[in-house]
Amino acid sequence: MKIGYPCINEALECRSSRTFRLASYSEERLIETVEQNLACLRRILEYNVQHGLLFFRLSSDLVPFASHEVNQYNWQEHFKMTLKRLGSYIKNNNMRISMHPDQFVVLNSPNEKTVRNSIAELVYQGSILDLMGLDTTAKLQIHGGGAYGDKPAAIQRFAEVYHTMLPDAVKARLCVENDDRTYTLQDCLQLHELTGMPVIFDNLHHECVNNGEPMREAVEMAATTWQPEKDGILMMDYSSQAPNERRGKHVQSIEEQLFHDFLAETEGMDMDIMLEIKDKQESALKARDVAQSLGRLEV
């Protein structure tokens, strides 16, 4: 098992997601910002290796406006060697990487422009992982999208877009995650049947909306969608409910006993866990210690 957290390390004074306003776009500004983002990413990765946190979600904003028509610069060529070196560091330290495009990526939208923009964003993020030289166990994670008043039709529309419009390089990395409102684990399993995409399991979302599956059974069902030689082992998101907040809101800091109980409940199962918890690396370090105490951690 690898433990990780998304995008930002609050122990470091830099961010790998610096951006700027569209109105102030220039190639010079783009190059300067990406240089800063990739330098900070290197520092985050080094911190993670030093602290035994071997799962990390890259920021979607490494390259600002990468999928926007304003950006015509060949940043792929410009940063090819930097990205390759980052990828070598990741591989040499046995880290696992993912990316999670923003909520505007909706493949089953009835709006054709939304679908085109979504695909452009997936192509950009997939190209980051490709330029790093990472294999297809590094994944792009999206949600099922909307139901639009007819979820079966929306699911079919997702599958049609997947098969007819997505490049193979994106399909090789794409995963779908159960969400906290619309797409249950069962819906995601149906998408898997239609596309072959692995299902990323989110325990908090499953607690919010489900079809009655006990937690261990749900994890097992998601795990069966992963082909280890191609996809790696199950990736999952872990969090718990923030008290006195709207349903599905992530807790500020990990509740170690709850995490311990979850690991005990899933004993013997292989998975890499991304902590979606507000205080980022602080909770990841605590989770690392809990997993280590149970003999579950890969070091």
Image (cartoon, grey):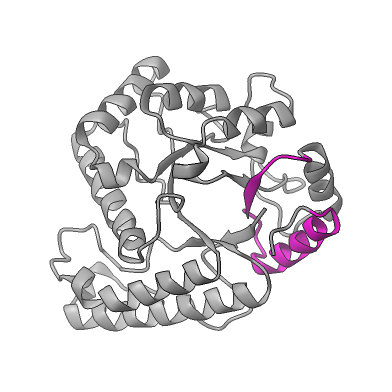
Q: In the rendered view, does 202 fall on the left or right side of 167? A: right
At a point 34% along the width and 38% down the height, the residue shown is 106
Q: How many numbered circles are shown? A: 0
Camera-nearest residue between 15 and 284: 284
Q: In x, y percent, where is residue 11?
A: 64, 79
User: For residue 221, which quarter of the picture?
Assistant: top right
Q: Is residue 144 above or below residue 277?
A: above
**Range drawn in magenta:** 267-295
Q: Is residue 5 magenta?
A: no
Question: Among all residues in the image, which is located at the extreme front?
Answer: 229
Instruction: Say if residue 118 shows up in the picture.
Output: no
Question: Among all residues in the image, which is located at the extreme left?
Answer: 72
Q: In x, y percent, where is residue 251?
A: 71, 53
Q: In x, y percent, where is residue 208?
A: 65, 32
Q: In the rendered image, which quarter contains the C terminus?
A: bottom right
Q: Is residue 151 above or below residue 34?
A: above
At a point 40% along the width and 50% down the height, the residue shown is 136
Q: Is residue 289 magenta?
A: yes
Q: In x, y percent, where is residue 72?
A: 13, 66
Q: In the rendered view, does 135 fall on the left or right side of 180? A: left
Instruction: Say if residue 141 shows up in the picture.
Output: yes
User: For residue 289, which quarter of the picture?
Assistant: bottom right
At a point 69% along the width and 22% down the height, the residue shown is 213
